Amino acid sequence: MFMQSVPVKLDEIYVPAKFRATLDPAKVEAIAESVISEGLKTPIQVRRDKERYVLIAGLHRLEAVRTLGEATIQAFIVAARLH
């Protein structure tokens, strides 16, 4: 099954604390440079929450796009896991 990416506003994406702790500024900078020259190749993954999206994968891509001053990012919307 093919997933379609959609633009999501950066200010609607919540980043869980467990992800924020792993942020590597050097990696963000390298990805930002790649986005400038080649564009964002792989959309991030988010799941829908009540009034926002929750980041599932792609912290460094999200932060790279944020540092470039963009308002939106391409994202795959995935279903929440059932426990």
Image (spheres, grey):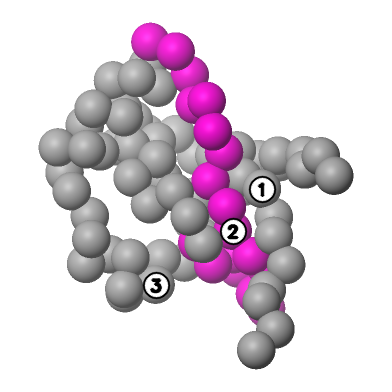
Provide residue 20's location: percent of width, then percent of height. 28, 64
Disc 2 marks a residue whose amino acid type is: Val
* Element carrying mark 1: strand
Element at label 3: loop
Q: Nearer the viewer, residue 45 or 81?
A: 81
Would you name the residue on which mark 3 appears? 16
The reply, left or right, for residue 29 in relation to residue 15 is left
Place of residue 26 in the rendered image (x, y in percent of width and height, measured from the top left): 14, 37
Q: Position of residue 34 (x, y in %)?
A: 34, 19
Which residue sits at x=44%, y=34%?
70
Secondary structure at badge 2 equals: strand
Name the residue type under label 3.
Pro
State the quadrant of the C terminus.
Answer: bottom right
Span colored in magenta: 37-55
Question: On the picture, is 60 further left or further right than 75?
Answer: left
* Mark 1 → mark 2, Cα distance in angstroms: 6 Å
At label 2, counting other C-alpha atoms closer than 10 Å, the crowd grade (few under 14, some 14-19, many 20 or more) is many
Quick one: which residue is furthest to the left in this view?
26
Instruction: Give the Cα separation between the discs numbered 3 and 1.
Output: 17 Å
Give the residue type at disc 1.
Phe
Q: Distance between the residues labelled 3 and 2?
A: 11 Å
User: Could you tell me which quadrant the N terminus lies in?
Assistant: top right
Verify whether residue 46 appears in magenta: yes
Residue occupied by mark 2? 46
Say which quarter of the image contains residue 32. Answer: top left
16 shown above or below 56? below
Do the CB atoms of the residues marked 1 and 2 lie less than 8 Å apart? yes
Disc 1 target residue: 76
Residue 9 visible to an observer of this rendering: no
**Viewer-nearest residue: 58 or 53:** 58
Residue 1 image label: none
